[in-house]
Image (tube, grey):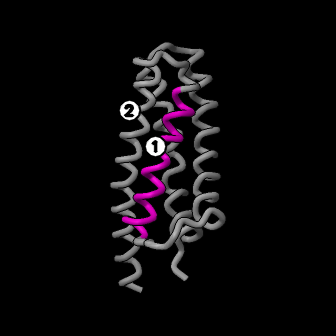
Amino acid sequence: MEFELLELRAKFLRYSGVSIIAVAVTQSVLWLGIEVVEWSPLSANLLSVSVGAIPAYLLNKKWVWGRQTEHSIQSEILPFWIYNFLGLALSSGCVAFVSTQTSSTVVVMLTNLLVFASLWIGKFFLLERVIFRQE
């Protein structure tokens, strides 16, 4: 039992590291989309969340949960993207609303970050207990 708790803590720390990388990618693409390419905040959010999900999935699978198996669309990729789509839908709704209230890119970026932060713990347990569970 104590070993399992230590292993869970180690996974959570690695998951936190992966999250930092995913946030950096997502926020960078979001900023570039709004400020450089001059897309709407909603369009930039759609792209940034999609791009950020790729390293998040790959790093979580291999580094956090140590899975070296082939990628399973049904048991790994689809559930991961469904949860990510939930975050995308929530963040897009919030970003669309916030962008009608302000033209501040920083506020739009913070909105995106806060939505995903609210889903962060749930995603860890989804990955641990469902997607990458140890058989």
**Relative to 24, is 75 on the left or the right?**
right
The correct choice, above or below, for 4 with respect to 13 in the image is below
In front of the other: 75 or 129? 75
Give x and y (percent) for residue 19: 40, 51
Task: Say which amino acid is labelled 1.
Answer: Gly
The image quadrant of residue 12 is bottom left
Q: Where is residue 105 in the image (x, y as percent from the top left)?
A: 44, 20
Q: Is residue 41 magenta?
A: no
Q: In this view, does 113 lie to the left or right of 94?
A: left
Where is residue 97 drawn, in percent x and y? 62, 23
Going by the numbered disc 2, the residue's amino acid type is Ser
Q: Is 57 placed above or below 34 here?
A: below
Return the residue nearer the eye: 48 or 72: 72
Q: Is the magenta stretch mostly helix, strand or loop?
A: helix
Secondary element type, mark 2: helix
Residues in magenta, as a range: 44-65
Q: Residue at x 54, y 65 (%)?
A: 71
Residue beneath disc 2: 28
Q: Quadrant of residue 68?
A: bottom left
Number of numbered discs overlaid on the protein picture: 2
Q: How far apart are marks 2 and 1 (CA)?
A: 9 Å
- Circle 1 sits on which residue? 52
Q: Does the magenta stretch include residue 47?
A: yes
Secondary structure under the numbered disc 1 in the rendered image: helix
Give above or below for 105 relative to 60: above
Query: Which of the image's four quarters has the C terminus?
Result: bottom right
Crowding at label 1, few (<14), some or many (≥20) Cα neighbours within 10 Å? many
* Residue 32 screen position, x and y as percent: 40, 25
